[in-house]
Image (tube, helix red, strand yellow):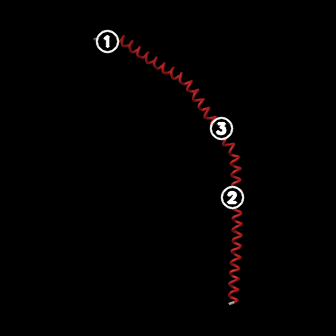
Amino acid sequence: EDEEARKDGGVEGVIEEIKQIISEQGQSLDDALEEQRRALLQHREEGDQKLAPLVERLDSMQFDLEAAKQELEKTARQQIDPLAGRLQSLESDLEEERRARERALEEQVAPLSEGLE
C-alpha cells in the first residue's frame, strides 16, 4: 500500500507538475498575445495618424473639385443660354422665311391655277 500511495503521490505530483507547466505556458502565451495586441493597436494608431492628413487633403481636393465643377457649369450656362436663345431666334426666323416663301409661291401659282381652270 505504501508503494501504491507513493506511486499515486508520484503520479499526482507529475500531474501537478504538468498542470503547472501548462499554466505557465498558457500565461506566457496570454502575455505574448497581449503584447501583440498592443503592438497592433499602436501600429494602427500610427497608421491613422499618417492617414489623417491625407484624408483631409482628399476632402479638401474633393471640395475644390466640386467648386470648380459648379463654376464650370455656371460659365457654360452663361455661354450656352445666349447661344440657345440665338438658335431659337434663328429657327423662328427660318420658319417665318419658309412661310413667306410658301405664300409667295401660292401667290405665283394661284393665277396660273386660275388660268388653267
Describe the element under mark 3 as helix, strand or loop.
helix
Q: Quadrant of residue 24?
A: bottom right
At horizontal 71% and vertical 53% (from top left) the residue drawn is 42
Residue 82's spot in the image, x, y percent?
Answer: 54, 21
Mark 2 and mark 3: Cα distance apart in space: 34 Å
Dot 1 alpha-carbon crowd within 10 angstroms: few under 14, some 14 to 19, many 20 or more: few
Residue where numbered disc 2 is placed: 37
At horizontal 40% and vertical 16% (from top left) the residue drawn is 99
Q: Tag on residue 63?
A: none
Residue 43, compared with residue 98, is above or below; it is below
Lower position in the chain sequence, tag 3 or tag 1: 3
Which amino acid type is shown beneath numbered disc 3? Ser
Mark 2 and mark 1: Cα distance apart in space: 103 Å
Lower position in the chain sequence, tag 2 or tag 1: 2
Residue where numbered disc 3 is placed: 60
Residue 15's spot in the image, x, y percent?
Answer: 68, 78
